[in-house]
């Protein structure tokens, strides 16, 4: 009996090993093919919302990262150099701790269905919510023993923000993703300050999660809790790449579990910010924010940014700090033509409302995509055509036998595209209108003369697309 039992256990272990193709090693994890939905989606919505949305402030300064209001705790409350600490003490009091903002984060006007409908109307195919930012506040009723009074069900909205939005987003037919900060300012060490921590040492001593418990009793259990309870299609990690090693964070072990055993193993995609040394090397897709990273465009990638200069709502921003819809559409077109996705961020107010200017920008992008979506969704970058010496910039995308030439300024002269050897043009038409386009192939060039259209006959504003049907010999 003992021999039989031993053989059964051994056989079961072998079967388990064979059914788990991904080992906790980079060469194995990196061999996984990214699920196709991500490369097809092209456009997603990012949401930075939390306790930092109560003060919703950071002084406007020049430079990358300088206006991020979601960094209020580390860069305003704890910073004397930029006048932030003076702002905090003047408006909230010298003894007012950052954690005292939590009861004021009420979300009393929040309607997750309204958000989801708006995101759907923007043309987005997926949504990514900050489940926990660097301040450690959780937007779901986590079971972590270190978050009993620091989550949205216990203090603030008294609601499961992650759960409610996940349900609403999926009801509208979009994928749901979750941002999760690997580090926490009260518990994680950093090279970025003289003290070695992001916030004053008295708060570290008061709220710090013991380093020996942080990974095994908090980080990994929380990540698995989010995956099992909410089955996200995407995990956007952040912060781990600054100081913490993959060995300490057990990054490879978690990813092996995620790819082999988790309920989302066939659909989930992850970025490259779990641990130090990962960015641009490991991850289903590489990530950049406000163009801060050198990206390998041959690997799936995503650019994220706010409509303004901040992710979290920053009340110090004015209209000049916000991008126009034309600028955002141009950025979307440019990113997609280089093979990437755009994750465009909105920063809601603490009451759960989205600033009207952000809503307007999303709807204008959505209106453009209603006309030109075929030139964006499901496409890939293409080198079948080239554009040189044209009066306006031209961006190319490809899908099947179709190549799309997208331009963001209306040309007053004819367009000239060089053809890659073997490419034959079969037909050419305007996306969104039946107005005829005059074209001819001369040598290895495609010459195009656009019709004269009044503003009332243009299919859309801001950018236009030509559909070119080709064959390759």
Image (cartoon, grey):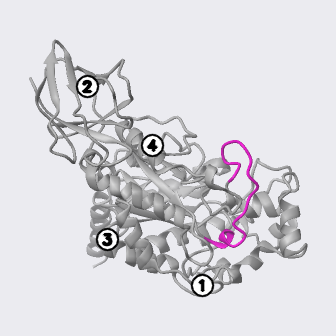
x, y percent for residue 454: 28, 42
The tag on residue 157 is 1
- How many marks the image carries: the answer is 4
Position of 381 with respect to 44 (left or right) is left
Q: Nearer the viewer, residue 195 or 450?
A: 450
Identify residue for label 3.
9
User: Can you identify the residue that label 4 sits on?
Assistant: 331
Mark on residue 385?
2
Give the mark nearest the N terminus, 2 or 4.
Answer: 4
**Closer to the eye: label 3 or 2:** 2
Residue 20 falls in image quadrant = bottom left
The Cα–Cα distance between marks 3 and 2, rounded to whole angstroms, is: 59 Å
Q: Residue at x 30, y 41 (%)?
A: 464
Report the span colored magenta.
Answer: 50-67
Which secondary structure, mark 4?
A: helix
Q: Quadrant of the C terminus?
A: top left
Q: Circle 3: is it few (<14), some (14-19), or many (20+) Cα within 10 Å?
A: few
Camera-side residue: 84 or 272?
84
- In front: label 3 or label 1: 1
Q: CA distance from mark 2 to mark 4?
A: 20 Å
Given this view, does label 1 or label 4 mark the residue nearer the observer? 4
* Left or right of residue 455, residue 331 in this image: right
Q: CA distance from mark 1 to mark 4?
A: 35 Å
């Amino acid at each position: 009996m003992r021999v039989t039992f031993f053989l059964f256990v051994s056989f079961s272990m072998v079967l388990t090993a064979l059914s788990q193709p991904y080992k906790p090693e980079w060469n194995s994890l990196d061999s996984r093919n990214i699920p196709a939905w991500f490369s097809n989606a092209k456009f997603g919505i990012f949401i930075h919302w939390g306790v930092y949305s109560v003060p919703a402030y950071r002084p406007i300064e020049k430079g990358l990262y300088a206006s991020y209001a979601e960094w209020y705790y580390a860069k305003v409350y704890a910073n004397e150099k930029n006048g932030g600490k003076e702002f905090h003490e003047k408006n909230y009091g010298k003894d007012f701790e950052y954690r005292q903002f939590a009861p004021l984060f009420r979300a009393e006007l929040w309607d997750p269905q309204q958000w989801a409908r708006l995101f759907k109307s923007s043309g987005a195919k997926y949504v990514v919510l900050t489940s926990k930012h660097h301040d450690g506040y959780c937007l779901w009723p986590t079971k972590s023993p270190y978050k009993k009074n620091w989550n949205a069900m216990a203090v603030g909205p008294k609601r499961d923000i992650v759960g409610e939005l996940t349900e609403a987003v999926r009801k509208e037919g979009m994928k749901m993703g979750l941002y999760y900060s690997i580090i926490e300012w009260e518990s994680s060490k950093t090279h970025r300050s003289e003290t070695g921590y992001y916030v004053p040492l008295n708060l570290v001593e008061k709220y710090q999660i013991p380093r020996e418990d942080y990974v095994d009793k908090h980080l990994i259990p929380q990540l698995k809790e989010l995956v099992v309870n909410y089955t996200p299609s995407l995990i956007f990690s952040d912060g781990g790449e600054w100081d913490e090693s993959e060995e300490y964070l057990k990054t490879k072990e978690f990813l092996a579990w995620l790819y082999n055993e988790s309920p989302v193993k066939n659909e989930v995609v992850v970025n490259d910010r779990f641990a130090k040394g990962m960015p641009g090397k490991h991850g289903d897709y590489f990530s950049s924010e406000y163009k801060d990273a050198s990206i390998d465009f041959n690997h799936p990638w995503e650019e994220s940014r706010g409509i303004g200069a901040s992710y979290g709502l920053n009340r110090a921003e004015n209209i000049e700090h916000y991008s126009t819809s034309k600028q955002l559409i141009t950025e979307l077109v440019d990113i997609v033509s280089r093979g990437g996705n755009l994750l465009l961020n909105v920063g809601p107010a603490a009451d759960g409302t989205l600033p009207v200017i952000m809503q307007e920008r999303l709807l204008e992008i959505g209106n453009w995509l209603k006309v030109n979506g075929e030139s964006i969704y499901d496409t890939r970058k293409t080198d079948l055509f080239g554009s040189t010496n044209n009066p306006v910039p031209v961006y190319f995308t490809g899908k099947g036998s179709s190549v799309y030439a997208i331009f963001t300024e209306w040309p007053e002269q004819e367009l000239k595209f060089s053809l890659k050897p073997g490419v034959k043009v079969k037909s050419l038409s305007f996306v969104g209108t039946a107005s005829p386009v005059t074209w001819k192939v001369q040598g290895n060039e495609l010459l195009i003369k656009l019709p004269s259209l009044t503003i009332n006959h243009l299919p859309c504003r801001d950018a236009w697309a030509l559909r070119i049907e080709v064959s390759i010999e």
